[in-house]
């Protein structure tokens, strides 16, 4: 019997038990953003300690941070073999608005072979799969084909404010050959994908101040600058009519797509017409010369996320508002630095500042982009494991979003990062009625178990970035 057949037998026999255990995990309302749930965060960490210990892992601990604790565990007896560092998080998003849930957010229910609960897909369900994959290998063989470390944090949903310093302080403890994260999604139902890159992020708020208070438009209009007109003029200067960003130097360090990457994206057969219908827009828009996937995965952006100022109630109010503002975020691609981009934004704003107003810029969160070459042995090994279980070719994709801590892993530990997720974009993570398709739970367990054997056959020297 092959190792994959053994895994299949074990997971089939243990399925109901595993789902009951996962439900116990999902019942814990571990909402990191709300201080009243601090005891629940501790309970979730303790639940993980018990689960990791039961799986056969060693040195299991709850490590305190300035915020919510980190859970660590390892098994390091595969002499000479690579070490996988598995990262995940046990915290979840708030559940508001509660009235839009069809079942209790922390009362797991299975409907149509989907498990509904907050955290089912993001990220408790996927973390649980890694623990059970290790447990299965230990039960079947009494050992693991590779060395394994677990790092499960409790602050991912609030930006991981304590984790980077934890990584720096525990660099030797976390030393590994590859980092595996299951907190991303597949290309679609039955379409596995390995994500090998994520965009970075920076954001600013721009506030435009005019007079000391709102002014009567009949008395002052035409003679005093209107902050709303000023901010519209400023914002129009950021991009041309085709969506190309006009900030000087914005594209200077953008890493171009390789011919192999562009061919791989084209081979996915993405239908832009279907997307138009799905999101109900008359046409798509973006930087000229690039496909939709290239624009959203591998090109930087500058987007307005909210504009405010003046009167917006019913009827009309004839004033020149005293203030106006806008929130702007930029998605960044490999070799762009968030600090440098913010400075370029500030320089552009200063250069294009309209007369008659004061403009101030406030910086927000930043995260660096990340990429592991998609032909890296650890990435390709994940693709092979997917293909054995799903029986279809694996797609190699980039993510348009940002997980800032992934870039920190990449930069501090200097290891290849493999994002092998099992969620689907339709699963409502961060929204009411979050759920996880159980066919991907079942198949994902087998994929993860097989991946350890795939990594076993790669030399540590070949895994180095």
Image (cartoon, grey):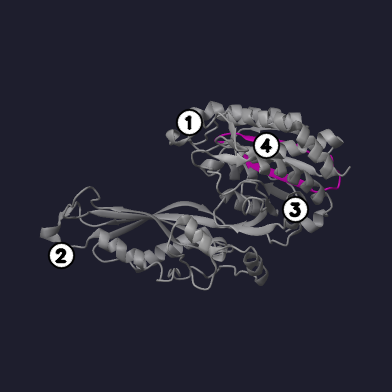
Expressed as whole percent of the image width and height from the top left, the position of residue 42 reads 59, 28
Q: Which label's residue is closer to the chain start, 2 or 1?
A: 1
Q: Is residue 312 left or right of residue 173?
A: left
Q: Are marks 4 and 3 in contact (CB under 8 Å)?
A: no
Given the current orientation, which residue lies at the most extreme left position?
Answer: 219
**Label 1: few (<14), some (14–19) or many (≥20) C-alpha neighbours in 10 Å:** few
Q: Are marks 4 and 2 in contact (CB under 8 Å)?
A: no
* Residue at which label 2 appears: 223
Expressed as whole percent of the image width and height from the top left, the position of residue 196 reads 65, 57
Q: Which stretch is magenta?
A: 66-89
Q: Are marks 3 and 2 in contact (CB under 8 Å)?
A: no
Mark 4 vs mark 2: give the one in front.
Answer: 4
User: Distance of mark 3 from mark 2, alpha carbons?
Assistant: 70 Å
Tag 1's secondary structure?
A: helix
Front position in the image: 19 or 306:
19
Give the residue displayed 62% in from the left and 54% down from the top: 187
* Residue at which label 3 appears: 391
**Label 2: few (<14), some (14–19) or many (≥20) C-alpha neighbours in 10 Å:** few
Q: Is residue 212 left or right of residue 243?
A: left
Expressed as whole percent of the image width and height from the top left, the position of residue 205 reads 38, 54
Q: Which label's residue is closer to the chain start, 4 or 3?
A: 4
- Against 280, residue 100 (above or below) is above
User: Distance of mark 4 from mark 2, alpha carbons?
Assistant: 64 Å
Residue 35 is marked as: 1
User: Distance of mark 2 from mark 1, alpha carbons?
Assistant: 50 Å
């Amino acid at each position: 019997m092959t190792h994959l057949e053994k895994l299949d037998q074990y997971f089939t026999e243990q399925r109901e038990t595993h789902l009951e255990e996962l439900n116990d995990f999902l019942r814990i309302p571990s909402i990191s953003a709300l201080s009243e749930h601090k005891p629940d965060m501790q309970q979730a960490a303790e639940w993980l300690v018990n689960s990791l210990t039961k799986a056969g892992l060693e040195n299991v601990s709850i490590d305190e941070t300035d915020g919510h604790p980190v859970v660590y565990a390892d098994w390091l007896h595969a002499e000479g073999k690579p070490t996988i560092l598995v990262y995940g998080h046990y915290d979840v998003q708030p559940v508001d608005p509660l009235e839009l849930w069809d079942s209790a957010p922390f009362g797991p229910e299975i409907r149509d072979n989907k498990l509904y609960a907050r955290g089912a897909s993001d990220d408790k369900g996927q973390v649980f799969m890694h623990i059970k994959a290790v447990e299965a290998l230990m039960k079947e063989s009494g050992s693991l084909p590779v060395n394994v470390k677990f790092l499960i944090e409790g602050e991912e949903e609030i930006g991981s404010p304590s984790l980077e310093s934890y990584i720096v302080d525990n660099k030797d403890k976390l030393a590994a050959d590859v980092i595996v994260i299951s907190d991303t999604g597949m290309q679609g139902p039955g379409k596995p994908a390995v994500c090998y890159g994520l965009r970075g992020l920076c954001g600013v708020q721009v506030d435009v101040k005019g007079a000391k208070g709102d002014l009567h438009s009949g008395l002052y209009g035409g003679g005093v600058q209107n902050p709303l007109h000023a901010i519209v003029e400023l914002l129009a200067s950021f991009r041309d009519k085709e969506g190309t960003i006009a900030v000087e130097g914005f594209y200077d360090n953008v890493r171009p797509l390789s011919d192999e990457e562009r061919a791989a994206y084209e081979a996915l057969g993405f239908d832009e017409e279907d997307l138009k219908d799905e999101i109900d827009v008359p046409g798509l828009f973006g930087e000229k010369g690039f496909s939709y996937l290239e624009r959203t995965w591998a090109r930087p952006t500058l987007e307005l996320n909210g504009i405010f100022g003046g009167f917006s109630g019913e009827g009309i109010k004839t004033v020149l508002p005293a203030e106006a503002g806008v929130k702007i975020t930029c998605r960044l691609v490999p070799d762009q630095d968030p600090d440098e981009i913010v400075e370029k934004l500030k320089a552009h704003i200063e250069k294009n500042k309209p007369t008659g107003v004061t403009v101030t810029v406030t910086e927000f969160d930043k995260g660096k982009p990340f990429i592991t070459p998609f032909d890296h042995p650890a990435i390709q090994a994940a693709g092979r494991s997917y293909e054995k279980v799903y029986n279809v070719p694996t797609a190699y994709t980039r993510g348009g979003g940002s997980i800032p801590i992934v870039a920190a892993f990449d930069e501090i530990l200097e290891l290849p990062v493999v994002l092998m997720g099992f969620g689907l974009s339709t699963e409502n993570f961060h929204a009411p009625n979050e759920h996880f398709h159980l066919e991907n739970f079942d198949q994902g367990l087998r994929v993860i178990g097989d991946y350890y054997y795939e990594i076993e056959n790669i030399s540590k020297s070949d895994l180095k970035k």
